[in-house]
Image (cartoon, grey):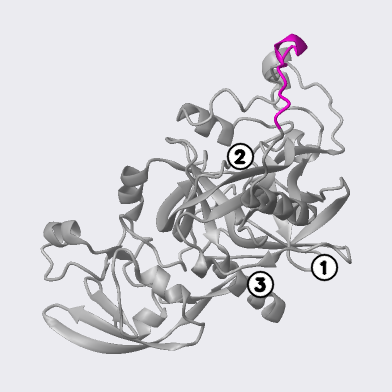
């Protein structure tokens, strides 16, 4: 997406994009879930926004329909080709979709003494607790991509504050301890591993060929309780830019995400979004808590790059320029009195720790300065819709790129060798 940590400085920062995105599409919430001994967190964030209030209490009783109210019909049910395709997708994919549970040792909650920090408040003295064992504090979903146990999920699912152990629960109920192999420094992607063989896997599709209106299927551990819940919808939008956050105040700007109306709930985070061929086209990541059936998935083509990097180098690397910038549109042009209505304006942040140019970075070495405007990269125009971060994601570490830069009233060409962010 996660208890999401603050964005690393290495990521190409976006100065004012959070405010712009929030006002445009409402509050986007990463859809991890808190379960077990510690509850609240993301539940409270969602419920307070009116998104899914009332369905998050695991003790809420389900309504049972009395037999006397049931009516029957002798008319046979008609199954369409699409209905059958969905059934086939679910049957084929479900064995490779897993639940991921984050756990914390009781000793981390109560301290080495085994005494709860709340005991003295209520009882005047600490009451001895059993400090052995673990409690569940969060979780999400994932899917298996290699028969030897490599699993893709969201970064925010496996970076939950306080978690010191992650368990993978298979569709058949088997459990495995998981190891985090790598997390993407510029996107909400993580790769984890379990010690197993001959596992079922999912096929990664081509998110670049996904079209608005395509039927898609989401599978995941809904609400941290309903394992392998299936929902169906369509692709509602493409190439969205969102700022997703959680109840801790952490946030991350995600580019080029897929919007879908397939119902996505807390706990679905990290699960697959599949097309009718049973191929993964996205990773379910976030929901708009101000609306209904507005969910977002990371495109799978980004994940393919991550998997290749992990298999080759044991880590995920992303190309790095080292600038803080503001995407330029007509409004920014007017506000900043600029001569162009596109490009990336290099600007400093609000504190001394947010320089316009990171010292020693490729941008610094290439001589870029604050208030320079990057107009093009390798001939590709930098726009609000296709901004600097998106274009850089398509480049490689150590690749030399050509920037067209407006510096004052002069336009110049600058050669930059990209660096690396890694995890």
Q: Which residues are magenta?
A: 64-75
Marks 1 and 3, how far apart at CA: 14 Å
Query: Residue 274: x percent and y percent?
Result: 62, 57
Indicate left or right for 235 with 405 as reference: right
The residue shown at (69%, 36%) is: 77
Within 10 Å of disc 1 (Cα), the crowding (few <14, some 14-19, many 20+) is some
The residue identified by callout 1 is 147
Earlier in the chain: of badge 1 and badge 2, it is 1
Tell me whether circle 1 and circle 2 mark residues in contact (CB < 8 Å). Answer: no
Element under disc 2: loop
- Specify the principal SS of the magenta part: loop
Residue found at the very far front of the displayed protein = 75
Marks 3 and 2, how far apart at CA: 25 Å
Within 10 Å of disc 2 (Cα), the crowding (few <14, some 14-19, many 20+) is many
Element under disc 1: loop
Residue 106 lies in magenta, yes or no? no
Quarter occupied by residue 153: bottom right
The residue shown at (46%, 66%) is: 11
- Where does the C terminus fall, quadrant-wise? bottom right
Query: Residue 395: x percent and y percent?
Result: 47, 80
The residue shown at (36%, 51%) is: 18
Whether residue 41 can be seen here: no
The residue identified by callout 3 is 307
Element under disc 3: helix
Query: Residue 286: x percent and y percent?
Result: 52, 47
Q: Nearer the viewer, residue 420 or 113?
A: 420
The residue shown at (30%, 73%) is: 382
Closer mark to the observer between disc 1 and disc 3: 1
Q: Is residue 248 above or below residue 179?
A: above
Label ID, residue 266: 2
Query: Residue 185: x percent and y percent?
Result: 54, 65
Q: Nearer the viewer, residue 401 or 298?
A: 298
């Amino acid at each position: 997406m996660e208890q999401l940590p603050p964005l690393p400085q290495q990521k190409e920062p976006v100065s004012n994009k959070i405010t712009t995105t929030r006002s445009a599409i409402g509050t986007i919430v990463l859809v991890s879930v808190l379960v077990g001994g510690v509850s609240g967190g993301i539940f409270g964030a969602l419920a307070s926004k009116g998104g899914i209030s009332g369905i998050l209490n695991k003790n809420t009783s389900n309504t049972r329909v009395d037999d006397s109210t049931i009516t029957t019909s002798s008319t046979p049910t008609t199954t369409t080709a699409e209905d059958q395709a969905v059934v086939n997708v679910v049957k084929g994919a479900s064995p490779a979709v897993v639940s991921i549970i984050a756990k914390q040792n009781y000793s981390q909650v109560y301290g080495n003494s085994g005494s709860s920090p709340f005991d003295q408040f209520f009882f005047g003295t600490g009451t001895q607790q059993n400090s052995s064992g673990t409690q569940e504090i969060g979780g999400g979903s994932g899917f298996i991509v290699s028969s030897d146990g490599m699993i893709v999920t969201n970064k925010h699912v496996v970076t939950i504050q306080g978690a010191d152990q992650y368990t993978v629960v298979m569709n058949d109920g088997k459990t495995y301890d998981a190891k985090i192999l790598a997390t993407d420094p510029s996107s909400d992607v993580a790769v984890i591993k379990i010690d197993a063989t001959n596992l079922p896997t999912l096929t990664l599709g081509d998110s670049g060929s996904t079209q608005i209106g395509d039927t898609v299927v989401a599978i995941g551990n809904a609400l941290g309780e309903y394992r392998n819940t299936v929902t169906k919808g369509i692709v509602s939008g493409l190439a969205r830019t969102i700022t997703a956050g959680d109840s801790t105040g952490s946030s991350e700007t995600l580019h080029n995400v897929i919007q879908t109306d397939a119902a996505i709930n807390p706990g679905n985070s990290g699960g697959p979004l599949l097309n009718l061929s049973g191929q993964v086209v996205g990773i379910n990541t976030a929901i708009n808590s101000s609306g209904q059936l507005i969910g977002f998935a990371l495109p799978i083509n980004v994940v393919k790059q991550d998997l290749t990097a992990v298999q080759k180098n044991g880590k995920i690397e992303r190309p790095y320029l080292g600038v803080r910038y503001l995407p330029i549109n007509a409004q920014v042009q007017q506000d900043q009195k600029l001569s162009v209505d596109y490009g990336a304006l290099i600007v400093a942040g609000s504190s001394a720790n947010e320089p316009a140019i990171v010292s020693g970075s490729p941008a610094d070495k290439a001589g870029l300065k604050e208030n320079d405007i990057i107009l093009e990269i390798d001939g590709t125009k930098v726009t609000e819709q296709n901004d600097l971060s998106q274009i850089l994601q398509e480049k490689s570490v150590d690749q030399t790129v050509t920037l067209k830069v407006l510096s004052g009233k002069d336009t110049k060409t600058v050669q930059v060798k990209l660096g690396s962010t890694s995890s």
